[in-house]
Amino acid sequence: MTSVESALHTEAARHLLSAYATGKPVAPIIEEFPGATIDDAYRIQQAQVADWVAGGDRIRGHKVGLASAAMQRQAGVDQPDYGHLTESMFFLDHEPIPAGTFLQPRIEPEIAFVLKRPLRGPGVTVAEAIAAVDFVLPALEIVDSRVRDWKISIVDTIADNASSGGVVLGSTPVSPHAVDLRLTGCVLYHGGRVAGTGAGGAVLGSPINSLVWLANTVGPLGIELESGHVVLPGSMTAAQPMAPGDTFSTTIAGIGTVTAVLGREES
C-alpha cells in the first residue's frame, strides 16, 4: 500500500467519522473519493475501527451484511460484506435506546451466533463452524448509514462498517443442534403488527453458511473470530425503517423473542 493510498483511507475514514460527531450524514464515498475499490473500502472501515479502539471501545464480534437476496435487492448490490461489532453497539432487550443514537436507522431480525472457540480461515468447513458455536440467540440488528439518504454502493456500505448501528440480543440461549437453522422461520413485528416474515434459508442458504463465509473471508486478512464473540449472519427479512418511539420485536421459531425500543425524542 502506497502512502497516497494510506492517506486516502485516512481521509475517507475521517469523512465518515464526521457524521458520528455532527449527527449529520455525509456524501457517498464514491462521490467524494472516485475510484475507491472494495479493497479501499475495507481499509477505510479498518481505519475507523482503529480510531474507536484507540478511544476505548472494544471489538465484540462481527456481522455479515447483505447476505439475503432481499437485502441485496434493497441495497442494489450483488454480494455480502462484513463489519465489526463494538461494545458500544450492544443494547438491552426491551430497554429504550436514546433516540439520538442513530442517524437513519433500519431494523433487521437475525439469529446471533455466540462462539465458544475461535474460528480462523481460510479453509473453515461447515462442520468446524457448527462445532465452534456455543449457542444461538434471537437478535435484532439496527443498521444505520452515515451516508446521506442511504445512497450507497457496495463500496459505501463496506467503508461505513457494513452500515452497522446497534445490536439487541435476546436472553434465551439455544443449542445450534436443537433447531434447523435453515428452516427456522421468523416474524418481525412493528408495534404489534406484522412487518415481515422470513426463514434462516434466506441467509446464504443457511446462517451457518454465512458464518463459514465470514471466517474464510476475514482469515486471510489476519482477523480471527474470537471465543465469546457475537456473529450476526444476516437478516432474514428486508430491513424496516425505524423512527423515535418505535417498538420492534421478532419471534424466531425454536429460539425465542427479542424486542428493540427506540426512545422518543425530547421536546
Image (cartoon, helix red, strand yellow):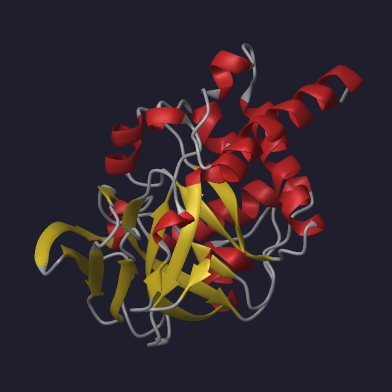
Percent coordinates x, y for residue 126 in the rendering: 52, 64
Q: Is residue 50 left or right of residue 204?
A: right
Q: Which residue is found at the position 56% from the left and 18% from the top?
A: 30
Q: Name the quadrant containing residue 251.
A: bottom left
Q: In the rendered picture of this protein, how many numbered marks are placed on residues?
A: 0
Which one is in front, 196 or 97? 97
**Residue sitting at x 37%, y 59%:** 206
| Residue at the farthest left position | 193
Q: Position of residue 24 (x, y in %)?
A: 50, 36
Residue 232 visible in the shown view: yes
Which of the 4 quarters of the picture holds residue 110? Answer: bottom left
Q: Position of residue 258 (x, y in %)?
A: 31, 76
| Quadrant, the N terminus | top right
Q: In the image, residue 225 lies at what x, y percent? A: 67, 64
- Looking at the image, which residue is at 25% across and 73% down? 252
- Quarter of the picture containing the C terminus is bottom left
> On the image, which quarter does residue 93 sit in?
bottom left
Task: Establish if 236 lies above or below 92.
Answer: above
